[in-house]
């Protein structure tokens, strides 16, 4: 970390956290630690910079941005799209805190059916890159959260799929005893019922 000081006062002006990429236990899913500039007014950071992605060997074209606002205990997911509309997602929290989840749906993958769980918040400013072949969901940990994600493909209703959030095979350790889940998500398939839409 590098510290800057105002020349006349010696007061710390801002901290810079150098952008880094971190592999998770499923290496294709990556945590991005962003450059954050802080001073007495607040903070500033670039939530996405294509050149930095290219420097990290991540060549990704985003075509759609989504933002949702949810209250504590809300679980959204586990969602994915298939075929020509399969999506990669870059997930980020603007306000609050969430537990973000990526589930490997790639048949024959050594981590098939396993999941990654990462806390994203307006305090750590981290982003999570989830490539095609994974289901995505999140749980709101704070009183409310504004969640943003960039997608590599547009939404397509016919290509949309979902897995029930409390599937026993995946066995995600959610924190809420009384989650708030949409009717649509409660009708989602079990993991053992999904088709071989992604092959490792």
Image (cartoon, rainbow, N blue to C red):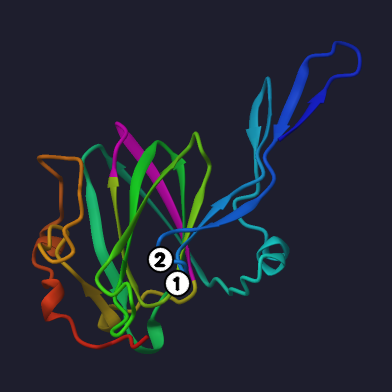
Instruction: Give the residue drawn at x 30%, y 62%.
Output: 115
Callout 2: 10 Å neighbours few (<14), some, many (20+)?
A: some
Provide the major secondary structure of the magenta segment. Answer: strand
Q: Residue furthest top?
A: 9
Indicate which label's residue lies in the foreground, 1 or 2.
Answer: 2
Instruction: Please state the horizontal and vertical placement of residue 41, each as a whole percent of the image.
Output: 67, 23
Task: Decide if residue 162 is on the left or right side of residue 80.
Answer: left
Task: Decide if residue 78 is on the left or right side of residue 116.
Answer: left
- The residue nearer to you, when weighing 27 against 148, is 27
Q: Which residues are magenta?
A: 140-151
Which quadrant is home to the C terminus? Answer: bottom left
Instruction: Please state the horizontal and vertical placement of residue 101, each as a whole percent of the image.
Output: 32, 57
Which quadrant is home to the N terminus? Answer: top right
Q: Residue furthest front?
A: 110
- The residue nearer to you, when weighing 16 against 155, is 16
Instruction: Give the residue drawn at x 66%, y 65%.
Output: 56
Disc 1: which residue: 131
The secondary element bearing badge 1 is classed as loop
The secondary element bearing badge 2 is classed as loop
Instruction: Give the residue drawn at x 15%, y 52%.
Output: 181
Disc 2: which residue: 26
Location of residue 61 (image quadrant):
bottom right
In magenta stretch: residue 147? yes
Instruction: Please state the horizontal and vertical placement of residue 192, each as a whole percent of the image.
Output: 12, 77
Location of residue 83 (image quadrant):
bottom left
Q: CA distance from mark 1 to mark 2?
A: 11 Å
- The residue nearer to you, when weighing 65 against 61, is 61
Instruction: Please state the horizontal and vertical placement of residue 139, each as a whole percent of the image.
Output: 27, 47
Task: Decide if residue 105 is on the left or right side of residue 172.
Answer: right
Count of numbered marks: 2
């Amino acid at each position: 970390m590098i510290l800057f000081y105002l020349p006349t006062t010696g007061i710390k002006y801002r901290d810079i956290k150098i952008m880094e990429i971190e592999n998770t236990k499923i290496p294709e899913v990556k945590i991005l630690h962003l450059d954050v500039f802080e001073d007495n007014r607040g903070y500033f950071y670039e939530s996405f910079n294509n050149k930095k992605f290219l420097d990290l060997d991540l060549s990704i074209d985003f075509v759609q941005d989504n933002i949702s606002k949810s209250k504590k205990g809300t679980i959204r997911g586990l969602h994915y799209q298939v075929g020509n509309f399969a999506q990669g997602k870059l997930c980020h929290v603007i306000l609050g805190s969430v537990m973000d989840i990526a589930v490997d749906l790639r048949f024959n993958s050594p981590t098939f059916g396993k999941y990654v769980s990462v806390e994203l918040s307006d305090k750590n400013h981290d982003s999570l890159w989830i490539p095609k072949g994974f289901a995505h969901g999140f749980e709101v940990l704070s009183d409310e959260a504004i969640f943003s994600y960039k997608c590599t493909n547009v939404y397509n209703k016919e290509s949309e799929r979902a897995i029930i959030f409390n599937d026993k095979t995946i066995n995600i350790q959610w924190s809420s005893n009384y989650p708030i889940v949409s009717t649509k998500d409660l009708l989602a398939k079990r993991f053992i019922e999904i088709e071989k839409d992604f092959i490792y």
